[in-house]
Image: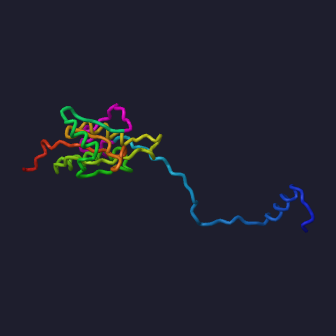
């Protein structure tokens, strides 16, 4: 066919089909480049998994969780709480709960608080994340931390960390040192 002849659109399709009649589809052994990720589903609480009475230690409360976490027990000095909020009292230890399910986070928090009390730590940091990857973009662990920490007598106060140390994705926790004497 020379360049002077023009073909009708139907003829082009017919010619293409004729040329492709004997073609064999090429199969390859490469992985597909994109697979949609499945959304993680939370496991229901299981007493066998939670073990050692943790389900009794942390109950689910109906507490509204705002952008900033803030809790102070009566009797805590305002100045001390302000220093905690500003980050003037550096955390002595840190727990990162990123990627954990609620049941795993509950166990990790209980163990971490026991460790902190045993070692007489005054301020600790808990990284719970902002919840930007969770379903409905709601911060599940942040809400749970807000509930669970209020239920522990050794927790005197907690607040969202300063921006330089995680902001609303982390919390500073002020702990009591009473009843944690290790033979001193």
How many marks do you count on the picture?
Answer: 0
Residue 60 lies in the magenta-colored region:
yes
Q: Is residue 108 above or below residue 144?
A: below
Q: Residue furthest right?
A: 5
Q: Quadrant of residue 32?
A: bottom right
Q: Which residues are magenta?
A: 46-67
For residue 35, side relative to residue 176 (left or right): right
Q: Main secondary structure of the magenta part?
A: loop
- The structure residue drawn at horizontal position 92% and vertical position 65%, both measured from the top left corner, is 4
- The structure residue drawn at horizontal position 35% and vertical position 47%, both measured from the top left corner, is 163
Q: Is residue 91 above or below residue 16?
A: above
**Residue 176 place in picture, x, y as percent:** 17, 42
In this view of the protein, which residue sits in the foreground, 55 or 164?
A: 164
**Residue 150 place in picture, x, y as percent:** 26, 36
Residue 125 lies in the magenta-colored region:
no
Residue 12 visible, this orientation = yes
Q: Quadrant of the N terminus?
A: bottom right
- Report the coloring of the rendering: rainbow
**Residue 25 place in picture, x, y as percent:** 70, 64
Q: Is residue 13 above or below residue 133?
A: below
**Residue 56 place in picture, x, y as percent:** 25, 37
Q: Residue furthest left?
A: 184
Residue 1 visible, this orientation = no
- The structure residue drawn at horizontal position 44% and vertical position 44%, both measured from the top left corner, is 134
- The structure residue drawn at horizontal position 30% and vertical position 47%, both measured from the top left corner, is 126
For residue 74, side relative to residue 69 (left or right): left
């Amino acid at each position: 066919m020379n360049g002077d002849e023009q073909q009708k659109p139907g003829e082009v399709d017919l010619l293409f089909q004729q040329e492709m009649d004997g073609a064999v589809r090429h199969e390859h052994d490469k992985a597909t480049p994109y697979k949609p990720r499945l959304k993680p589903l939370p496991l229901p609480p299981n007493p066998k998994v939670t073990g050692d009475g943790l389900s009794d230690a942390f109950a689910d409360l109906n507490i509204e969780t705002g952008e900033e976490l803030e809790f102070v027990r009566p009797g805590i000095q305002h100045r001390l709480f302000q220093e905690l909020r500003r980050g003037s009292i550096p955390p002595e230890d840190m727990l990162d709960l990123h990627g954990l399910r609620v049941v795993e986070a509950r166990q990790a928090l209980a163990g971490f608080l026991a460790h902190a009390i045993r070692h007489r730590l005054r301020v600790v940091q808990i990284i719970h994340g902002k919840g930007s990857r969770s379903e409905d973009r709601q911060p599940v662990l942040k809400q749970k931390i807000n509930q669970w920490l209020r239920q522990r007598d050794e927790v005197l106060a907690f607040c969202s960390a300063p921006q330089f140390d995680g902001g609303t994705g982390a919390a500073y926790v002020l702990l009591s040192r009473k009843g944690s004497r290790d033979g001193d």
